[in-house]
Structure formats: C-alpha cells, structure tokens
Image (spheres, helix red, strand yellow):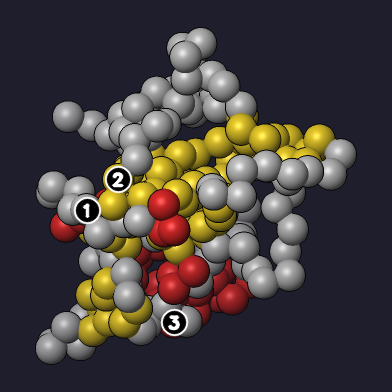
Amino acid sequence: MSKDLRTWIVECLAADPRPQKDFARALGLDPAAITNLKKGTRQLSGNELIEAARYFKVVPPMLEQSMRRTQTGTVLGFAEDGVPDLTPGLRIAGELATDRWRRRDEPLLQARTRLIQHDLRFPAHRQTAWIVGDYTIEKQAIPGDVLICVSFDNDEAVPDGVLVIVERVRAEGALVEWTARRTRILGDRLGLVPESYNPRLNVPLIVGGGGDDAEVTRFPGKVVMMHRYTA
C-alpha cells in the first residue's frame, strides 16, 4: 500500500473518536486486518477504500484526482451535507459480441443506464465499461459480466498478450462491432484472439500487413477490471 494512503488511514483513525473495531466492522474486516493496514502490510480493495471514505467522511489522496464530472457520469463528488458521494460513475459504453453489428447510436436497452464502479488505480476519465454479450471470451468472462478498460496513451503501442476491447467499423462508420480479445504480436501484424470453447467463436482476427480497406479496427483500451454478473 502506498505511503500516502497508509498515512491517511493512520491519521483518520487517530482523529476519529470511535473504536477501531467499528471501522473494521464498517469495512467487513477482522480487527487484525486494520492493524495490518496501519502497518502497510495489507492492501485496501477499491470497494474497501470507498467504504473507508464514507466511514471517515474524508476523501483519501487516491480519490481526489477523480473528483470531477466526466462524460461517463459523476465519479466522485460531495453531497449537500459534505459527505463524499462515491456512487459508481461509469456507464455501459457498448455490448461485446462477435458478428453483432449495430448502429453506433443503437440503444442498449437498460444496460446504458447502469452505473459501474471504475478502477481506482487509473483516472476515471480514461475508463469505459463494456457488458459481455456472448461467449467469445468465456474463459475470462461470460454474458452479463462487465469489463472495465483504460484507454491507451497517445504514443502507447498495443502490447502483446493483453485483453483489449476491439472496435471494428464498417460502412463508413455507420456500423460497429465491439469484442474483447487477447493480443498476439505476429511480426508486422497483430492477432486478436478470442478465448472461447466454441469453435465458431474462437476465430482470430488479423490486423495489419494489408487488409480490408473498407473495415477500420480501433482499440478503445485494455481491460483492467471485471465485475462478475450475479443474478
């Protein structure tokens, strides 16, 4: 755990009149885990960090940079009473499914209204959420799961062996398909490999080295987090 975050926890506990066991209960942890947090030998998960901020009513350093409104929704702000409002702020950007071509402005039923917790390790404005719609990557995620991706830096090459969101565009931008695939560097070309048990879906895409000029392939980002679907 970073020194700044450990210091924040120690200072908040010292300033709070409530017993330490109350803090442990609020986070759903054993009191011994709080001792390890203070020592810096245990990490806080994203959800635990949010609950800690709610408990102390103080925003930790890690979250201060996210206190903004972005095109993905309100990530972090303050309610009228001054209590941190840590409502998850990412909206579903699209549905991941092989050969499911759609108009870019086609609605996603109720999915687009869902608010998803972003990954606290990265700036919120660089993140998007994607709902899994088929079994293209069933070895990693199944329909209903939500993947969080972070956009690549302007000069960052797509690395080998990472799970990325793939956007294919046809008909001069009128039709789009989104999938998640594993990258494989193949000389001057890039392979985009599904991770499915279904042979029909488990067909790689090859980008570069000459191809269909009528189709454009883009990469909204690399996957950094998954929210598992629960009925």
> What numbered label is drawn on residue 64?
3
Q: Is residue 30 visible in this depiction of the protein?
A: no
Position of the C terminus by quadrant: top left
Q: Relative to 81, is 133 above or below?
A: above
- Three-letter residue code for mark 1: Glu
Say which residue label 2 marks: 102
- Label 2 or label 3, whichever lies nearer to me, is 2
The secondary element bearing badge 3 is classed as helix
Residue 49 appears in the rendering: yes
Left or right: 130, with 209 as reference point:
left
Residue at image location 34% in from the left, 40% down from the top: 101
Q: Secondary structure at mark 2?
A: strand
Residue type beneath disc 3: Glu
Q: Are marks 2 and 3 in contact (CB under 8 Å)?
A: no
Tell me which residue sits at (45%, 49%) in the image.
170
Identified at 55% across, 27% down, the residue is 194
Name the one closer to the observer, 48 or 79: 79
In this image, 187 relative to 207: left or right? Answer: right
Q: Secondary structure at mark 1?
A: loop
Q: Position of residue 32 (x, y in %)?
A: 46, 47
Cα gap from disc 2 to disc 1, whole angstroms: 7 Å
User: Residue beneath label 1, please?
Assistant: 106
Q: Dividing the image into 4 quarters, which one contains the N terminus?
A: bottom right
Q: CA distance from mark 2 to mark 3?
A: 37 Å
Residue 154, numbered circle: none
Residue 220 locus on image (x, y percent): 51, 57
Front-lying residue, 189 or 95 = 189
